[in-house]
Image (cartoon, rainbow, N blue to C red):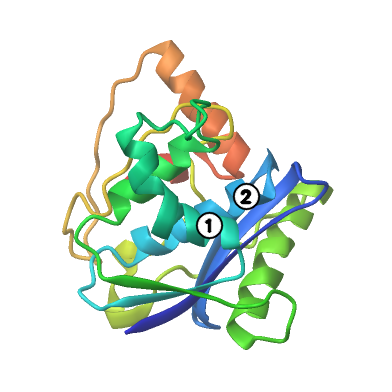
């Protein structure tokens, strides 16, 4: 079983925001946005953890200090889906694009969520929290984003998580498959992609929001 913590941070809530998942000092990833909510960051941390481990058959134990996230995933989503992603009162579900992506990432996975008390000296939770906060502070101060090494177990660098560019707060999500190609790591492949001016503008905006280059944005979709 993979045991990992997922956490999010938003300065001002909403404000500069960061997400992170953490297994150990050699296996973690983080990213964020210039402006998002704490709940969005918490959800993204979980989504990125599932995506980073999508190539594995191991069970996944997610340590999370957000009751909101745990309840969304384990209790509320099935009912929301039946109602067209609306709550019992008929109002639209908040953060629905992120929730839809998480719902898709859960398909075929064996997982368990465990609530841990935040800021209570839990080693994995504290490690994820500090990395998520470091990203939010980096956005606040205009510094480089500490994105981490990503998934480094089993020598599978292709599954490493990178700052998310397929979703931005308030925008429609572009769902990326966990793995599209099985390239040998030593080989390089050139792919030519034709984009309209509007498509390129949207991709550049997402890349800028995530603090990555346009090339990194495209690679993250693989």
Q: Residues within 10 Å of mark 2 (few under 14, many from 20)?
A: many
Q: Is residue 83 above or below residue 220?
A: above
Q: Of residues 72 and 222, which is closer to you in this image? A: 72
Question: Most extreme residue toward the top, as rendered?
Answer: 197
Q: Quadrant of the N terminus?
A: bottom left
Is 179 on the left or on the right of 127, as rendered?
left
The residue that appears at 37% across and 13% down in the rendered structure is 196
Q: CA distance from mark 1 to mark 2?
A: 7 Å
| Callout 2: SS | helix
| Residue denoted by label 2 | 39
Q: Is residue 122 above or below residue 151?
A: below
Q: Are marks 1 and 2 in contact (CB under 8 Å)?
A: yes
Q: Of residues 204 and 55, which is closer to you in this image? A: 55
The quadrant where residue 100 appears: top left
Q: Position of residue 127 (x, y in %)?
A: 64, 78
| Residue denoted by label 1 | 69
């Amino acid at each position: 079983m993979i045991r990992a913590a997922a956490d999010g941070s938003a300065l001002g809530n909403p404000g500069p925001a960061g997400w992170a998942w953490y297994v150990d000092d050699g296996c973690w990833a983080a990213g964020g946005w210039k402006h998002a909510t704490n709940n969005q960051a918490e959800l993204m941390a979980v989504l990125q953890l599932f995506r980073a481990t999508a190539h594995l058959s191991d069970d996944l134990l997610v340590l999370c200090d957000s009751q909101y996230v745990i309840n969304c995933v384990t209790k509320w989503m099935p009912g929301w889906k039946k109602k067209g992603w609306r709550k019992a009162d008929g109002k639209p579900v908040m953060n629905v694009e992120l929730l839809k992506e998480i719902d898709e990432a859960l398909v075929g996975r064996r997982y368990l969520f465990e609530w841990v008390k935040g800021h209570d000296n839990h080693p994995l939770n504290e490690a994820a929290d500090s990395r998520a906060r470091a990203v939010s502070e980096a956005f606040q101060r205009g510094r480089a984003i500490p994105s981490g090494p990503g998934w480094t177990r089993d020598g599978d660098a292709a599954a490493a998580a990178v700052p998310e560019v397929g979703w931005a707060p308030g925008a429609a999500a572009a769902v990326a498959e966990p793995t599209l190609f099985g390239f040998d790591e030593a080989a390089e492949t050139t792919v030519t992609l034709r984009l309209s001016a509007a498509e390129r503008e949207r991709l550049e905006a997402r890349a800028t929001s995530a603090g990555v280059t346009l090339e990194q944005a495209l690679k993250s979709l693989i």
